[in-house]
Structure formats: C-alpha cells, structure tokens
Image (cartoon, rainbow, N blue to C red):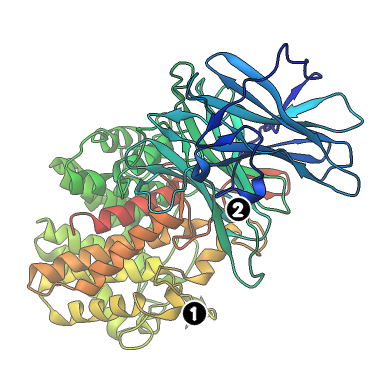
Amino acid sequence: MICAVALVLAIVLPVVPVHAGPAVQVCQNGVCDGGKDPGTAASDRILQTAQQWSRRIELHVSPADGWMAWASIDNGSPGDEVWLDRRIDGGEDRSLGRTSIPFGQRGWRSQMYWISDPARGLGQVRACGKAWDRPEVACTEYLPSCVSGWCDGLDPAGAQERFGPLSWVWYRKIALHIRTDSRMAWASIDNGSTGDQVWLDRSFDGGATWQSRLGGNGIPHCDPTTTCGWRTWMYTFDDTIGGTRPGMLRACGKAHDRGDIGCTPWAGPNDGIPAVPHTAAVDILMLGYDSNEHQWGPDDGQWLSANALTATIDYMIRTGDRRYAGVPGSIRARYPSGIPDENGFFDDYGWWGLAWVRAYDLTGDSSYLDLARDIAFRVGEAWKGETCGGGLRWKSSSADKNLITNVLYMKLAATLHNHGLGQGYWRDEAQKIWRWLRGGGGRPLLGSSPGLAYDTLHVDNGVCSVDDNYFTFTYNQGVLIGGLAELYVATRAVDTLLWATGVANMATAHPDMLSGNGILHYDPEENTDGLKDRAARYPEDGAAFKGVFVRNLRLLLDVSTSIGHPNSRWAEFLHRQTASIVANDRAGWAEFGFHWEGPIRLSFRVSDTEGSYVTFATQAAAVDAFNASAIL
C-alpha cells in the first residue's frame, strides 16, 4: 500500500541536559570506551538515521567488534556536534564521545563505545547531533533491540525465510522477509534505481507509533540501463532489554525522485502465508462481493462477476473448502433468471451459464443446471445465418460475430450434454458452432491451422472480415481450448482434441503471448491498466483474461490426462504462472494485480478520479491461476 503518513525522521529534543556525573567507562577485551577509532572497525552497520536541518545523524554498530557503536553526522557545517547516549539497566551515560565537525569538513564521527556492560547488563545506544547555530537536538531511537542474544544489525545473508507481505511504489517492489525461526526480519527493494531507499519500521503498540527508518539506506549504485535492489540488516520484532515488549515490523521504501512511500502491512513474528496463498486470495476476493447487490464490484461488467463466482466455486471444488458454498444460492435468489443484467450481450450470458454449471458441480443441486440450460437457449437465439454463413452475434444490437460468444456457447452446450441434458440436442449445438468455425463462415477467426484465434468478424453491408488489429486475446484462446475439450468428451472426435492441443501449445510458447520469462503477457491486454511508461487509464476488461486462459488450460490438461496423454509442459507452465504471481504480482499478504510477471502499479489517477488497479477481477484471475495449478 502507499502510506499517507508523516514518517518520524528523528526524535527532536530540547538542549541535552548536562550529565550529573561522569559516564561509567566500559572496558572489554582490552578495549575501553572511546579507545577505538571507527576507521579500524571490523564491520559497519547503520541501524538508523535521523535527519534535522539537512543533517544526517547515523547510528553505527559493529557486531564483529563485540557490539561497539559510534555516531556520525554528515551534510553539516563546522561546529555541528555529534555524540552517543547509552542506557543500561535504567541508568544513562550521556554525551559519550561528544565531538564537532572541524573547519573545512562537512561531516564527522565519534569514537567507538561499548553498547553493553558486563557489570551492568545489556545496553542500548542512540546517536544524537545538532546544528552549531540551533538549539534543537535530533536523536535516533535507542538501539539495538535484542531477544535471546539476537540483536538488530545482523546480516540476512543465508537466512531462511518464509513469505512475508509486499508493497509497490513506482514499480519498485518492497518486501518484508521473515526468518523461518520468527526471530528477525529484514526489508528489501527491487526493480529500483540509484538512490532508492528501503527501511524497516518497528512498533511496540500495534502500529499507533513506531521507530522509523531502521536500517534505512539507499541503493548505492545501479547501472542506469538496468534495475537493481538493496536490503536492510535484520531487526528483531520484540525487545527484551528492560522488560519484554512484543513488536511488529513493516518494510517501507521510496523511489529516489518521488515523494510517495510504499509500506507493507505490519507483521508479527509468527505471521506468514503458504507458498501459494490460495485460501487467503479467495478470502480477499470475497471482500469485493457486495452482499446487497449480490455481485462483485465496484467494477462494471457482470461477466467479471460471473468469472469471480466461477473462480470461487472452482476453489471450493479443488480444495474441499466449503466456506463460501452459500454464495451461488444468494445470487440465484436475487436474480432468478441467473442473469443479473439483461444487457443484450450474449457473451455475458454465456459466462453466467458456465458459472451455474459449476454451481451444480459444487452442490449437486439440479436447479443450477436448469438455469444454465435456460441461459443456453437464450444465447443460442443469437445465431444469424444471413451473414457470415451463421455464427452467434456478439450482442442484440450488432451484426458482428465475435469468437468469445461462439466458443462460450460451444463450451456451454457441450458441458450441458456431458451433464446428461438434452438427449443429444446440446451436443449437436456445440458441433454446429465448431463446424461453422472449422469449415464455415467463421473460419477466418481460427487463423492458421491450428494457431492463435482472432477476436471479431465485422459485418459491413453483408461482408464479413476479421478485425484489422487481429487481436489474439488470451481469453479467446482459453475458451476455445476449453470448449473443444468439452466437445471431445461429448463426441470423442479426435480432431477437436488435436486442434485444442495445437492452440494450447501455440499460446503457451508464442512470443506474442508471453514475457521473456515465459509468463502470460499479451501486450494489448497489458496496456489497459497504465503499465509503466504508458498513460494511466481506467482498469478494463482485460484484467480477467489470463485467468480464463489458465482455467481452461487446466480443463484441457485434465481431459488429456484422463485418456492417458498427460502434458508435463502444460503443468509446468501453470506452476510457472502461479510462482510468478506470488513473487512478482502480489501486494500486502495476498492481493494480486494484473501483470503476472510484474511490476505492478497499485493505483491510478485519471482526471479527478483515483482508484486501484488491484481489483476483484485481477484477484479472481490470480485465484484462477492457483486453482489451475492446485493438486497438479
């Protein structure tokens, strides 16, 4: 999410009071407070940065030197001061190593001091500083926090982690990484540029207040022709110094040239999600369900709601989880015809017909099949033989014949036959569509033999021609192969399965349909949500297309497997989509955007309208992908 908060960059104090007595000098291993120069430190880890009057005041620690610390000030002026404060078991040592920037310099640092004292216990330090001509003092938090010997500032290299939440800001991915033993976490930024910043915030009061910019640092250098990343040190969730304080962490970051800050949700030490957050994704999808309207929203387009319902039902069928089993019944009660919006778009009706078949598969309630059959009759009435030699019209007010309406009807009719309805009538209807596509007036829609199918036959003065753009949308390929898979089950006609296999092989390998990493990415679809370096625009229907494709590819895979022809390449393809969605297209814990290969853009602004590109439609598409790769 984008955090609209004012981050606490420093603790601003009045003039530091004079310490009542001399600080206790700590000596260990032959080294005493102030007796070691940071230039000889075995390690240097910046735990936190405070800022005031353009000065950067940083707290440095060296675990490799047995946990010593020093303070530094940069971007300052001669006379600016910097020092450490230390507290151990309730006592404080103030102004340790207090020093000032000498003439001709812009920065300076204190000597090194021990953080803890074997005689008094564990300690914490903070770096403080002030401008020479101002009374105000800026300090970091007292750090490090420690739990069972694990202290802030450890290196995450080699640490085992579990999935944590993500955020995105200006195409940078901000991640919170949680150790599998729950002791610590760290933050990272990826897909970034030189100067981008990443840090952790830590709260001990449920997020009401927090220690900010822990480990905050910028990407030091990045080749301008590439993207790169950075990470913080590890920090503990809790603090047991001076009493146990349970805590939470979040990762935050920003682009170097933008003011917007992206922060993950807060996470505790035991929070996490599975490698594939299937259930969490469905739960978030259901947050978009309006129990008054009995539709998903606020996006327009009832076909998107039909697909959200289908994805939810498929989840329940695949997993056995019935937590949302009452949803189909609530929608049917609100819309007895099974179609929420009688808008005259026959493809919309087809999506609802298929959703009601899946509702029957979930519940065994035959009244859902009756709904699907009634809808199929209505879609079938769109057949118009006077133009293009037949085929279904896209909508009642147009003569155009588009692929999606025809293959939806083919799939719905074949599915009804496979569920025992129609005594052959629905099988014949499905075959009628396939004959029109394979050898009739719809043949131009199928492209090469077989190949990627096109979107629309325009009808102009009785002449039918393919749309000049020759769009090969992913959902067209998906419903075509799904419809042919159902038609094969209905007829056992091998040519239907062979054609479906050819289209599936083409769609899962053709460079126009994939990113360089083999992730579904058809550019005319991806344009619709303001991808990086393109004009921002409202979300459009394409948000759900890829989900439709993988749903139907899994259907084809299941049919092929059932007759002894499993396809490991398709299975690997489905797993690849899921892995990329979780790694590169996730925000928060389990919210998913449109660009499965990443990066994603979370929000848009068009004129005076603001909104999110993470919608119920993009969420449903991700659920489709998880369904398609489940138990595979």
Q: Position of residue 247 (x, y in %)?
A: 46, 26
- Residue 456's place in the image compared with 439, above or below, is above
Q: Position of residue 240 (x, y in %)?
A: 44, 22
| Mark sitting earlier along the chain (1/2) | 1
- Residue 429's place in the image compared with 95, above or below, is below
Residue for point 85% across, 36% down: 80
Q: Nearer the viewer, residue 495 or 440?
A: 495
Q: How many marks?
A: 2
Label 1 with label 2: CB-CB less than 8 Å = no
Write down the quadrant of residue 294 in the picture. Answer: top left
- Residue 25's place in the image compared with 545, above or below, is above
Question: Type of residue at label 2?
Answer: Tyr
Residue for point 53% across, 59% down: 599
Residue for point 35% across, 76% down: 507
Which quadrant: the N terminus? top right
- In the picture, measured across the screen, residue 627 lies left or right of residue 46, that is left
